[in-house]
Image (tube, rainbow, N blue to C red):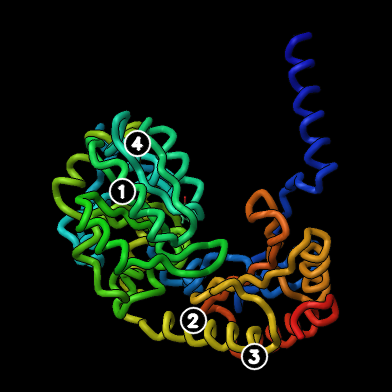
């Protein structure tokens, strides 16, 4: 007991250090989710510019009804892991629909996108293998690499020359894989997919892309950035999530039948975790249908995102090369960034302040995520508020 108390005291010291560096995080309660991409927090009705619900599907009555119907028919939980007795006809069908949506031979669903990355990377690669990773890739990719035991070769963000140097230096490795987010959540910019496809072909490696922020948003059918760029067939491993634009939960990998069979046997986050719950499978299936049948949602989102970026650029703000619905505004130092976010919040806008260590020192920013749930009027007002607030803080012209 004595030891345990000392242990907790130690944690407290560390938390106090975080507090002193203005880096301690605390949970904030969303009291209510409101229509129009709004939330109530601390009694205040805010336009939510921090969510990943890009198509506004999380509150869609059709997803909710499909989740309820799946629960009524199959239960609240799957009852077992997939390889034991948790692979319901619902999972089989869901994965078939997903493969069709992705134009792939096969697909596998994981309980989360995080688990899809960790399980896939650690399942496919091991000691003696090399993984080439864009510096700004998602944390789940880094965790998967660490767990794999493969050698990490990190290249500067979108730096193809550096990547090619690394590819040249590592020709003797057993398996080699290049992995990249397709849409980067910190800068809202895009991976150079066509160039990566060329490099992977030239050096004989695998290419894995994480379409977490692109699934449902990019491509004529909403498959993701690979579809938009026209390189779907050249990408070996398509990873994505249902937790962002698709409004519910879960991660996926799509590709060759042999890849999927292999993951069933080697991805520990797939093997040793209970199958995704039936209501979630119901919601996923409904979301895939909506993405296919309502392209106007992603068109509206991308159109509004373009207007948002254009107005911010015209006001002289640095949006860090964003080309997507994720739009950062560089504020520089931490204090100014926090003041920016706080002032926006006072005016009814919820946007996150990103500070080091998430971003490099001196590159702190406020990030806006747009959703098809937001009305044109709300977004127009939001743009004006952002520009006016930025000016007050000495940003832009
Ligand atoms: C959110 C995210 C994940 C993790 O997905 P979850 O379904 O939330 O676990 C993986 N990769 C990227 C790039 C993400 O943004």
Percent across and percent down for residue 134 are 44, 53
Q: Is residue 98 above or below residue 267?
A: below
Dot 3 and dot 4 residues touching (CB under 8 Å) = no
Quarter of the image containing the N terminus?
top right
Look at discs 3 and 1 and give the one toward the viewer.
Answer: 1
Q: Which one is earlier in the sequence, the residue at label 1 or at label 2? A: 1
Look at discs 1 and 2 and give the one toward the viewer.
Answer: 1
Residue situated furthest top in the rendering: 2
Q: Secondary structure at mark 1?
A: helix
Percent across and percent down for residue 132 are 37, 47
Beta carbon of the mark 4 residue lies under 8 A of ligand 1: no
Q: Which residue is mark 2?
A: 301
Q: Which residue is mark 1?
A: 167
Q: Which one is earlier in the sequence, the residue at label 3 or at label 1? A: 1
Q: Which one is earlier in the sequence, the residue at label 2 or at label 3? A: 2
Label at residue 122: 4
Q: Which residue is mark 3?
A: 377
Question: With 342 as the anchor, is 91 left or right in this view?
Answer: left
Beta carbon of the mark 2 residue lies under 8 A of ligand 1: no
Q: Which one is earlier in the sequence, the residue at label 3 or at label 4? A: 4
Dot 3 and dot 1 residues touching (CB under 8 Å) = no
């Amino acid at each position: 007991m004595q030891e345990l108390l000392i242990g907790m005291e130690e944690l407290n010291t560390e938390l106090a250090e975080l507090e002193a560096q203005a880096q301690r995080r605390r949970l904030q309660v969303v009291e209510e989710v409101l229509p129009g991409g709004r939330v109530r927090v601390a009694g205040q009705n805010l336009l939510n510019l921090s969510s990943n619900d890009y198509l506004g599907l999380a509150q869609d009555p059709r997803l909710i009804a499909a989740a309820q119907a799946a629960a009524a028919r199959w239960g609240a939980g799957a009852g077992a892991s997939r390889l034991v007795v948790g692979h319901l006809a619902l999972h089989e069908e869901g994965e078939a629909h997903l493969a069709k949506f992705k134009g792939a031979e096969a697909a596998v669903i994981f309980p989360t996108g995080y688990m899809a990355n960790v399980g896939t990377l650690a399942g496919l690669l091991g000691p003696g293998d090399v993984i080439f990773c864009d510096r700004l890739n998602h944390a789940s990719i880094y965790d998967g690499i660490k767990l794999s035991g493969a050698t990490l070769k990190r290249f500067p963000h979108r730096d193809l020359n550096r990547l090619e140097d690394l590819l040249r230096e590592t020709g003797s490795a057993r398996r080699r894989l290049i992995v990249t987010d397709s849409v980067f959540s910190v800068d809202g910019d895009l991976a150079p997919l066509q160039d990566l496809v060329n490099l992977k072909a030239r050096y004989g490696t695998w290419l894995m892309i994480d379409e977490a922020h692109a699934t449902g948003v990019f491509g004529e059918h909403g498959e993701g950035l690979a579809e938009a760029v026209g390189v779907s067939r050249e990408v070996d491993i398509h990873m994505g999530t249902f937790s962002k634009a698709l409004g519910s939960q879960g991660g996926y990998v799509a590709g060759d039948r042999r890849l999927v069979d292999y993951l069933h046997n080697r991805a520990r986050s797939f093997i040793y975790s209970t199958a995704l719950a039936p209501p979630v499978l119901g919601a996923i299936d409904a979301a895939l249908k909506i993405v296919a049948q309502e392209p106007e949602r992603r068109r509206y989102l991308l159109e509004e995102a373009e207007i948002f970026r254009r107005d911010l650029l015209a006001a002289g703000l640095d949006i860090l090369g964003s080309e997507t619905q994720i739009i950062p505004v560089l504020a520089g130092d931490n204090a100014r960034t926090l003041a920016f976010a706080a002032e926006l919040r006072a005016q009814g806008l919820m946007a996150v302040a990103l500070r080091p260590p998430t971003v490099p020192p001196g590159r702190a920013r406020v990030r806006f995520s747009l959703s098809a749930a937001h009305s044109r009027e709300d977004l127009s007002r939001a743009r004006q508020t952002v520009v006016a607030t930025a000016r007050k803080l000495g940003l832009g012209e």
